[in-house]
Image: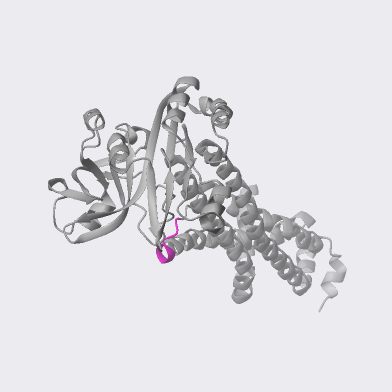
Amino acid sequence: MLSFQLISTVRLGIKSLMLHKLRSALTMLGIIFGVCSVIAMLAIGEGASYEAQEAIKKLGSNNILIRSLKPPEAARQQGGGGPRGMQLKYGLTYEDGARLQSTIPGVRRVLPMRIIRENVRFSRNELPCQVIGTLPFYTEVSGAEIVRGRFLCDQDELHQNNICVITAGLAQRLFAIEDPLQHALKIDAFYYRVVGILRERSKPEQRTQAGKMEGEPLDNNVYIPLSASRTRFGEVLIRRSAGSFEAEEVQLHQITVQMQDSAAVETADPQIKTALKRFHDQNDYELIVPLELLRQAEATKRRFNIVLGSIAAISLLVGGIGIMNIMLANVTERTREIGVRRALGAKRRDITLQFLVETVVLSVGGGLIGVAVGMLTPLIVSHATDMKTIVTVWSVLVAFGISGAVGIVFGLYPARAAALLDPIEALRHE
């Protein structure tokens, strides 16, 4: 009996709303835009956060990156305050790597890297690249993937072999129709046989002793044995300009310390800082801990979602106010109808339920349409801007749930106002 009465009330509410189709549609617009904006804004924020977190994860949550950094005072001297032709010595050393491997508890591997900017030639093609001297286990630490061929091996490092592995992007740009594995590249005065093609899991930061390579592809990388890099290029790197030269002695540009697990990363971070500070008189290095960056990114994501959700929720609030305004107008217009129903035996709760049902129908109907539009909007944004968007189940449920709650909260006052009308006065209303 109760369910039949509820169904009849819902039908009556829908029939009353259909008598004023345009007004009902305009009333629903506030809820539609509110739900749509909540879902779309959270989807855009979730996508941006996902990309940032993935970039950090690719650095390795169990890794600690240490990079050579030109001291500010040395940069000022070399930039104009100091004599031309001067030689700077700074950055990480091979001893730093060996010391970290032997003294820091929980270290699995220490991966040294030298990063040198050089032009790479094949036939008539020439491209500026990063020549990276490293050890054979680079792929295991960085997560890079060998597409074809192989990576460096222990024999290459031991015998300082003139072999190289190039990134897939460089292979496409340097070799038009040739097979890279059948040719050699010329770097400086030496030829290096290509033995493998590699796909980077992440794009290394362009921070070399020769400055940033702005406007150049980030995956123009050539990997050679660390021993060959040390022998072929030496420790002192020279840049000539306007009849003068600037020389920098940097043994290693980066050291990646791979720890056993995340717990070891947290304990090793201060220990590494202490160990390096003891043997470096100047501030010529920086530590990057991806695990800390990941946690900061997650915290930023939570704050970002709260801000976006709060901004979008204002639209739902405005939509709720619009519903309340229309329903109060409906109460005034239908005062005589309310009096007739009360005179025929309808109770106050029946009147309250009738108007509350109409409000919920408006808000839930607008919420369903808003969900559909809100899920479609991120797809359009992704297609139009190549921006990654992620629609989460919780954002849809929260947006739809709030739209239903808005209907109840903002419809309760007009419904109660209708129910509290005096039946006699309501019948006299014109």
Q: Going by the picture, which residue comes out furthest to the bottom?
A: 430
Residue 84 pos. (x, y %): 48, 56
- Who is closer to the viewer here, 387 or 366? 387
Residue 129 pos. (x, y %): 32, 53
The residue under the point 51% across, 25% down is 264
Residue 13 within the magenta-colored segment of the rendering: no
- Residue 21 sits in quarter: bottom right
**Would residue 43 appear left or right of 406 to someone viewing this image?**
left
Q: How is the image coloured?
A: one colour
Q: Which residues are magenta?
A: 383-388
The residue under the point 83% across, 70% down is 426
Residue 269 pos. (x, y %): 55, 30
Q: Is residue 57 above or below residue 44?
A: above
- Who is closer to the viewer here, 209 or 254? 209
Residue 385 within the magenta-colored segment of the rendering: yes
Residue 236 makes an appearance in the image: yes
Q: Is residue 270 above or below residue 367?
A: above
Quarter the C terminus occupies: bottom right
Residue 315 pos. (x, y %): 65, 63
